[in-house]
Amino acid sequence: MLKYYDNIEDFPLYRWRKCNKGEIEFTRIDVTDGTKADDKKHWLLIRQSHLDEFGLTNDFNHLLNLAEELAILQCDMVINDDRFLLNKIKRIEEELKRLINREAGSDLDTVLIHLSKWMNQMLNDKTLTVKLFYKMLKEYGKANQKN
């Protein structure tokens, strides 16, 4: 009998949200049965299946670009002793903090409400799979671009 989820095909959105908040024991089918080592292994498998299916998000790419820009500015400041760059560095650090500390759960609740309205039925994050959710979100985005 399977003890863990290992891909987004059948992984419920509710559990996805819990794991993204650090509670990776929700990769277990029965939360009381498993080990932390297996939790980590299966969370990586689930994340990899998400990346394989949908790739990186625009937000994550933006975060990576900001981190790269910050590293370059910090190096330039040290090499050239240019104190003017401190203002740019502080601005990028603040934006990175804002992006990293953003409350993802409340955003997802809002998205579920909008998707529910669009679908004319209430979506339940305990039964909705991660794969289906992201496919719906993609289609919702396409439909809104047409309007």
Image (cartoon, rainbow, N blue to C red):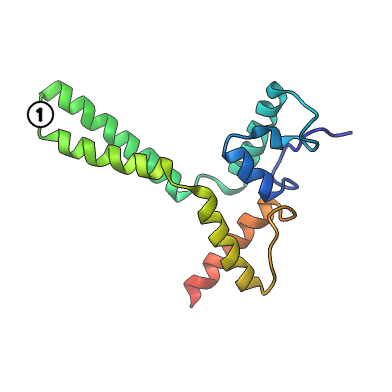
- Residue 111 on image: x %, y %: 55, 61
Q: Which residue is mark 1?
A: 82
- Residue 16 on image: x %, y %: 64, 44
As drawn, which residue projects farthest toward the bottom? 147
Q: In the image, what residue type sits under mark 1?
A: Asp
> Quarter of the image holding residue 96?
top left
Q: Is residue 87 left or right of residue 53?
A: left
27 and 55: which one is in front?
Answer: 27
Q: How many numbered discs?
A: 1
Describe the element under mark 1 as helix, strand or loop: loop
Mark 1 crowd level (few <14, some 14–19, many ≥20, 10 Å Cα): few
Eyeballing the image, is 36 above or below 91?
Answer: above
- Residue 134 on image: x %, y %: 61, 55
- Residue 108 on image: x %, y %: 55, 55
131 and 83: which one is in front?
Answer: 83
7 and 26: which one is in front?
Answer: 26
Give the residue drawn at x 71%, y 48%.
12
As drawn, which residue projects farthest toward the right? 1
Give the residue drawn at x 14%, y 34%.
85
Give the residue drawn at x 42%, y 41%.
101
Eyeballing the image, is 76 above or below 51?
Answer: above
Give the residue drawn at x 63%, y 58%.
135
Q: Is residue 144 left or right of residue 37?
A: left
> Quarter of the image holding residue 83?
top left
Quadrant of the frame with the N terminus: top right
